[in-house]
Amino acid sequence: MARSCAARSDQTLAAYYISRGALVNHWNKVFGKSLLMEFFTNGALDGAKLATLIDAGAELHPTERQRVLHLAAAQQNDAVLQMVLDKTGAGKPHIEARNEVGETTIHLVCAAREPSIAAVRVLLQSNADIETVN
């Protein structure tokens, strides 16, 4: 049930399911992702929707933290970057992790047509290495 609201990224429905005892840390074996990751990949990184799940105790699978940071960095979303770093256990190893083409989060932010200074600031305050070569 909760996965269906994640697929639509419906915050109200998610809150309803959570209030009724939905398992916010369910790992979907078929799709290989958590409910929280489903919101990240289908919800255009809406901070309020993600906070609903995180505040209810949803966690990212350890293998998902890096992917979420890369998604937020690519979208220049400083608020979600900060939320992921503050509330999901993501840290320097996840910030410095490289995606499939060798980019770190700082590379993704800086490579944008109009880089977000706020997103760069969040990453630098979290000790992103600015000397990492792509």
Image: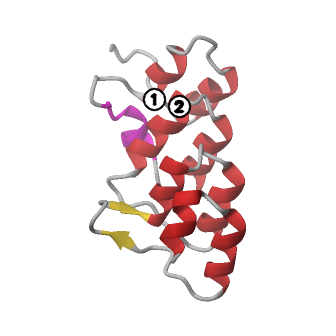
In the rendered view, does 28 fall on the left or right side of 43? left
Where 119 sits versus 85, above or below? Answer: above
Location of residue 45 by image quarter: top right
**Residue 94 is a magenta residue:** yes
**Label for residue 73?**
2
Location of residue 121 by image quarter: top right
Q: Is residue 88 visible?
A: no
Q: Position of residue 86 (x, y in %)?
A: 59, 52
- Residue pointed to by mark 1: 105
Q: Position of residue 1 (x, y in %)?
A: 51, 77
Identify which residue is drawn at 57% across, 67% down.
5
What's the colour scheme?
A: secondary structure
Q: Residues within 10 Å of mark 2 (few under 14, many from 20)?
A: many
Circles 2, 1 touching at the beta carbon (< 8 Å): yes
- Look at label 2 and name its amino acid: Ala
The secondary structure type at the circle numbered 1 is: helix
- Which residue extends farthest bottom? 20
Q: Position of residue 61 (x, y in %)?
A: 37, 61
**Stretch of the chain drawn in magenta:** 91-99
- Look at label 1 and name its amino acid: Thr
**Residue 126 is a magenta residue:** no
Q: Is residue 110 visible?
A: yes
Report the front residue among 40 and 63: 40
Q: Residues within 10 Å of mark 1 (few under 14, many from 20)?
A: many
In the rendered view, does 33 fall on the left or right side of 40? left
Location of residue 125 by image quarter: top right
Q: Looking at the image, tell me whether mark 2 or mark 1 is earlier in sequence order.
A: 2
Identify which residue is drawn at 35% across, 57% down.
62
